[in-house]
Image (cartoon, helix red, strand yellow):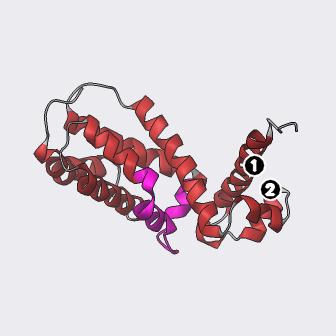
Amino acid sequence: MALDWLAERRTEVAAERILDAADELFTRQDAATVGMSEVAMAAGCSRATLYRYFECRDALYTAYVHRETNRVFRDVGERIAAGGDPAERLVDAVMASLHAVRESPSLSSWFTPTKRPIGGEMAERSEIIGALTEAYLRALGVDDVERRARWVVRILVSLLVFPGRDDADERAMLEEFVSPVVMSTRTGPAH
């Protein structure tokens, strides 16, 4: 019996195509209003095919959020210099994350203050967002990363839904109120 050695790759490509179609829709309209029928049509597949890859809209949203979270964290990692003061690196990482989401029309649609901000809901329950934030804080030498990571994610969501007056205002709030609390129980020097 011959094995279909491309089967797994086809599944990945199909799922990525569906997520790319969802991304285009999120660029044009509020993410909370995008339905499975619209995604199937944009991806050029039937609803049955769509449901084979994503059992419900929540599963599709979760997969999309996880893919984009990995991309944003990778981009932020490239923007933030290694080494230096951990408190400054934390503020720089939060600012870079805010910019990355705001610069992406598809991601910014998740945090529209006039609509249901599903980005906040997804951020709160995303294991990927939590794990990556915890790993970053751990690398900064922060103790009690689980609780502090949840708080940092909530701060990010808050600033995405209700931004400060400008970058300087947001940076000042992060330096005055966020960094001192998050960095208050460091376990040791960051690498």
Q: How many marks?
A: 2
Q: Residue at x 48, y 36 (%)?
A: 74
> Where is 127 relative to 191, above or below?
below
Q: Quadrant of residue 76?
A: top left
- Give the number of the disc on residue 17: 1
Q: Tag 2: residue type?
A: Ala
Closer to the camera in the image, 113 or 53: 53
Structural crowding at the residue carrying mark 1, measured as other residues with C-alpha within 10 Å and reported as few (<14), some (14–19) or many (≥20):
some
Q: Is residue 82 left or right of residue 65?
A: left
Q: Position of residue 190 (x, y in %)?
A: 21, 30
Residue hosting label 2: 43
Q: Position of residue 27 (x, y in %)?
A: 65, 56
- Give the number of the disc on residue 126: none
Magenta segment's dominant SS is helix
Helix, strand, or loop for circle 1? helix
Q: Residue at x 45, y 68 (%)?
A: 121
Asked if marks 2 and 1 touch (Cβ < 8 Å), the reply is yes
Closer to the camera in the image, 47 or 181: 47
Question: Which region shows up in magenta?
Answer: 107-129
Closer to the camera in the image, 184 or 171: 184
Q: Quadrant of residue 120?
A: bottom left
Q: Position of residue 110 (x, y in %)?
A: 53, 62
> Where is 179 relative to 115, above or below?
above
Q: Tag 1: residue type?
A: Arg
Q: Residue at x 15, y 52 (%)?
A: 181
Measure how far apart labels 2 and 1 are at the Cα level.
Answer: 6 Å
Helix, strand, or loop for circle 2? helix
Q: Is residue 122 magenta?
A: yes
Q: Is residue 108 left or right of residue 93?
A: right
Q: Earlier in the sequence, mark 2 or mark 1?
A: 1
Residue at the extreme front: 1
